[in-house]
Image (tube, coloured by chain):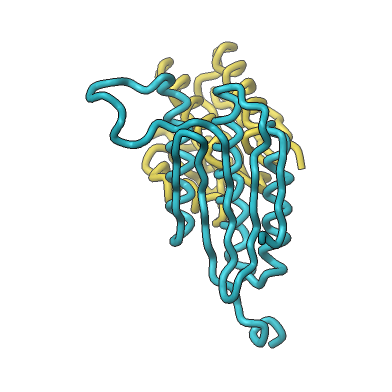
Amino acid sequence: MDLSLSTETMGDRTIVRVGGEIDVYTAPKLREQLVELVNDGSFHLVVDMEGVDFLDSTGLGVLVGGLKRVRAHEGSLRLVCNQERILKIFRITGLTKVFPIHTSVEEAVAATD
Amino acid sequence: MATVELRFSALPEHVRTARLVAAAVARRAGVDEAVLDEVRLAVGEACSRAVGLHRNVGISAPVKVLLIEEEKQFSIEVGDEAPHAVPGERAPGEVPGDAAETEEDEMGLAVISGLVDDVEVSAGEHGGSIRMRWPTAPPAALLA
């Protein structure tokens, strides 16, 4: 399955809904999307990963790159994920300490800290 | 001899094929269903790394994946033909060529070592390999 991407604005937050597989082949598309959003002035991003079937280290690298970009503008990048197999990858790489991970888009949008 | 041997051009789009084939062969070999996600991710990481290594130095040779069904265990070996710096040979204070590429490479290896208990990484000037092993269920357990 390929990667699907869509965006939606909620107040000052931009929701990026990701579906399919994020791997070495598809991750550049996600990177382009995140770079484009930051270049267009969206600095508070919520990446909804509920539709993601597969995530590898290339995908993690793109998310870390996105976080670096928004932080340069004092922004934020929050993740929405409830899938154990995806969460496991964040855990084994220690990235649960780097990304705020929420159980719903609503919760991520409401978060301020 | 490998149960299944796969060779693919070092292109990112083929890594998914390698993941699917590896998971299918692992399932047939009796690797626990709960572990198949890990097999899929680990083999994807190893193949992505090999593809990156080949592309970085412009190697046209394919990436090789051996899927080996043995008694009580299933092994996957992902081989590349990229020349690797032998550990310890780098002069003190010398910085590797591309820091970003090295970081990605290390992240992939970090995921593999976090996922797979039995893993061996070897590298030399003519190429390297990552060998990963998982236990398989005995046939009786499969029939139960």
Q: Residue at x 62, y 26 (%)?
A: B59
Q: Residue A54: percent from the left, percent from the top? A: 64, 46
Task: Name the residue located 41 percent from the left edge and 19 percent from the top edge.
Answer: B97
Rendered residue at 73%/53% (across/down): B21
Q: Which chain is yellow?
A: A
Q: Is residue A44 above or below residue B112?
A: above
Quadrant holding the N terminus of chain B:
bottom right
Residue shown at the point (56%, 47%) measured from the top left: A81
Residue B143, horizontal then vertical, whole percent: 72, 85
For the image, the number of numbered tags is 0
User: In this picture, is B56 found above or below A90?
Assistant: above
Q: Nearer the viewer, residue B133 or B85?
A: B85
Q: Is residue B101 above or below residue B111?
A: above
Find residue B124 and report its horizontal and vertical position in percent.
44, 38
Locate residue B47: give its quadrant.
top right
Locate residue B8 relative to residue B103 in the image: left or right: right
Residue sticking out furthest to the left:
B92
Q: Is residue B86 left or right of residue B142?
A: left
Asked if residue B29 lies left or right of residue B46, the reply is right
Going by the picture, which residue comes out furthest to the right? A1
Q: Nearer the viewer, residue A89 or B141?
A: B141
Q: Quadrant of the C terminus of chain B?
A: bottom right
Q: Which picture quadrant has residue A100? A: top left
- Which chain is cyan in the rendering? B
Percent x, y for residue B71? 59, 75
Front residue of B49 and B88: B88
B79 or A98: nearer the viewer: B79
